[in-house]
Amino acid sequence: MRCEECIALAEEHFEGGIDERSEARVASHLSSCAACDAEHKLMLREQAAYSRFLLNVEPSPALWENLRAGIERGRAASVHANARTGSDAFGLRQFCAGLFAAPHRAAAASFAALLVFVALATLTVSRSGAPDESAASAPRDARIDVSANAGGGADAGKNNSTAPPADSLPPVTQPAPSSAGSEEASAAVALKGGVRRGEREAARAARGGASAVTRSAGDESVGAWLRGLTGDGASGGEFASAAAASNSPDASEVARHAERVEVALISFLNARAGARRGVDVSYEKRGSQELLLRNVLLRQQARGEGDLPREELLARIEPILVEISNLPAEASPEDVRQLKEQLRKKGVLSALRLYPTGGTARAF
Amino acid sequence: MGEAMSGRLGEYSGTPTSDAERLLARARGGDDEAFRLIFERHHRVIMRFLYGMVGRHALAEELTQETFMAAYTNIGTLRDDSKLSTWLYGIARNVARKSFHARRGEWGQAGLEDAQAAGARDGGLAPDEQVFGKELNRVIAGALGKLDEDKRLVFTLKILQQFSYEEIAEISGHSIPKLKTDLHRARLEMRRMLRPYVEASDEV
């Protein structure tokens, strides 16, 4: 094998893996070529630096609040623009409000309006012309083509009648810290096939534990939003019931969990052997142990609710979390390579990225 | 079999059946809670992508907000069978591009505080390694800024965020051969800029 081919294949290996035969050829060449071996070591250190680069880029907790404020401003501007357009152009709204203000005028005004309407309709049909559009009747779904304008703020102001009621968006629900200690996490990974024992212990930890705290926090945010819609403390009737049922804190928990798992798996895929020939996966191992416990709880909840797609997704990622948790902090390159291969073949990252969106059926 | 499995793989019935499809349908219908869930699911990875594209934490956060504002406004245009994550990345890419053109010449001035914040959680590293790690983050951010936009995009998505070539092609609209060529050149340029620091890391 030529050196250029070896380095090119080594680079390809970092990007997505190569077949076992090519890998063996590269390993064989590296063992006999000092220059390529030195170059490969430098490439490994590069990869290690890249894998750490984005790890600590975290959004501030205020991001959702800022976004919510921006959306509210956009809505307010849109409502104001509609109101101003109506009164400036015709004054029709104010005129009608005055006309129907007093009951004794209402009947006469209604009859007059009916006569006018019939006359206009007859005239329009006889001329076969297109009906006029009132400036007050805004298009039902005035969305803007995102491909041309992805500016955000200004565009939000143009969106109008299909926007939800102009009221506060639900406040962000900060995830409650897990009350399950490291003991439960250790128990969950004690055996290579230790998921069953972990399930029993996780279930014991969950009774009266973190999930209850998180659930109550989620209910509080939904309740505050509903109160904002109805203007009082009442449940809001049928709409509120439907909204409360669909705004399950479980969906929010799984979404956050899926994101954390995605980040952890990306970090694992970026892990590379260091100078000591082992692969430092201590960070990924710790993360996977915490995520595994949460995964077990969420999977049980999904099973209890009969939510098959959610349960299947969680069941799909659980074995990977178990495997990473069971690796030693300094793992052998071969073990890490096999696990990465498993990750890629099973399409776990793609499945995570599809959740929660349309197209879930394709991921399975 | 659950509702979500009633269709054959790859088919879409046109009627939301799975939990995920219902969430998207709700968001498209103006349900703010559904949109909040979508935000929670994707905002962190979108921000990391934007950080890779613009190199500054505060700016990346600002652009993340712009991305989701645009998503909120335009989610009604999202086709039922589109991948939401790909669509969001497409918006983020446009937002980053506009920002970069507007702020031409401001890249590479990533404050030291950015690098320090980025390196703050290098758990398990000795103090010298942590200090050097922060410096390396600063160098990587600077090196990324010297790449042209196409190379920076494919480098960030492929190397830093482990997307497949197919997914990157969907986000960028570029062909896979072009992406591979751009990535290869990006790697060479990054290596040239990083090499002195990577070699020096041997001493740490």
Image (cartoon, rainbow, N blue to C red):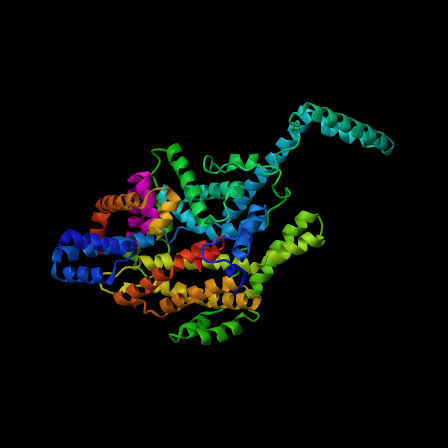
Give the image location of residue A40, x and y in percent: 19, 56
Residue B141 among those drawn in magenta: yes
Can you say which quadrant of the picture contains the N terminus of chain A?
A: bottom left
Residue A116 horizontal/vertical position (percent): 77, 26
Question: What residue is rendered at 43% in x and 54% in y?
Answer: A353
Residue A341, percent across and down?
Answer: 31, 62
On the picture, is B197 further left or further right than A68?
Answer: left
Front residue (pair A16, A84):
A16
Residue B113 visible in image = no
Where residue A192 appears, x then y in whole percent? 37, 74
Extreme residue toward the right, this view: A104
Identify the image quadrant of the C terminus of chain A: bottom left
Residue B152: quarter of image:
top left
In the image, the segment drawn in magenta is B131-159
Q: Is residue A127 within the magenta segment?
A: no
Residue B170 vs residue B137, the one in the foreground: B170
Residue under the image location 15 percent in, 62 percent down: A28
Vertical position of residue A151 compared to residue A197: above or below: above
Q: Is residue B14 left or right of residue B167?
A: right
